[in-house]
Amino acid sequence: MSERTRASIVQNYDAEVSALIADSRGVSVMDALRIFLSSETHHMLKDNSLRLWYFSPLAIFDMWENEVATGDPRNSLYLRGDEIE
């Protein structure tokens, strides 16, 4: 198993991204937290080898939105590395 990202780092992202989910989806922060905790994006965030904590909470939120829309957070421009024209 890969090394896990420090809990204090993950907790900060949990709070920030959950607030963004709650605002965008019109759900409570607790429901948004439950949604985020069960996502592949959150699982990836906990994997320290991926170093997703280099990204801002907004970028992690974008990854989560891509996961919801396409089924895979790796479809986010932040991870694909596509040029934006």
Image (cartoon, rainbow, N blue to C red):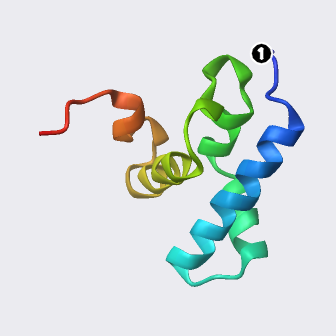
Left or right: 59 in relation to 12: left
Q: Quadrant of residue 83?
A: top left
Quarter of the image with the N terminus in it: top right
In the picture provided, is 27 more to the left or to the right than 82?
right
* Residue at 67% from the left image edge and 44% from the top image edge: 42
Whole-percent x, y for residue 3 in the image: 81, 17
User: Which residue is rendered at x = 45% and y = 42% of the image?
Assistant: 72
Residue furthest right as drawn: 7
Report which residue position mark 1 lands on: 2
**Residue type indicated by callout 1:** Ser
Q: Is residue 47 above or below residue 43?
A: above
**Who is closer to the viewer here, 61 or 69?**
61
Which of 55/62 is in front? 55
Number of residue marks: 1
Q: Tell me which residue sits at (38%, 50%) in the image.
A: 70
Residue 74 percent across, percent down from the top left: 44, 35
- Tell me where residue 79 appears, x and y as whole percent: 42, 31
- Packing grade of label 1 (10 A; few <14, some 14-19, many >=20) is few
**The C terminus, quarter of image:** top left
Q: Is residue 25 above or below residue 16?
A: below
Q: Secondary structure at mark 1?
A: loop
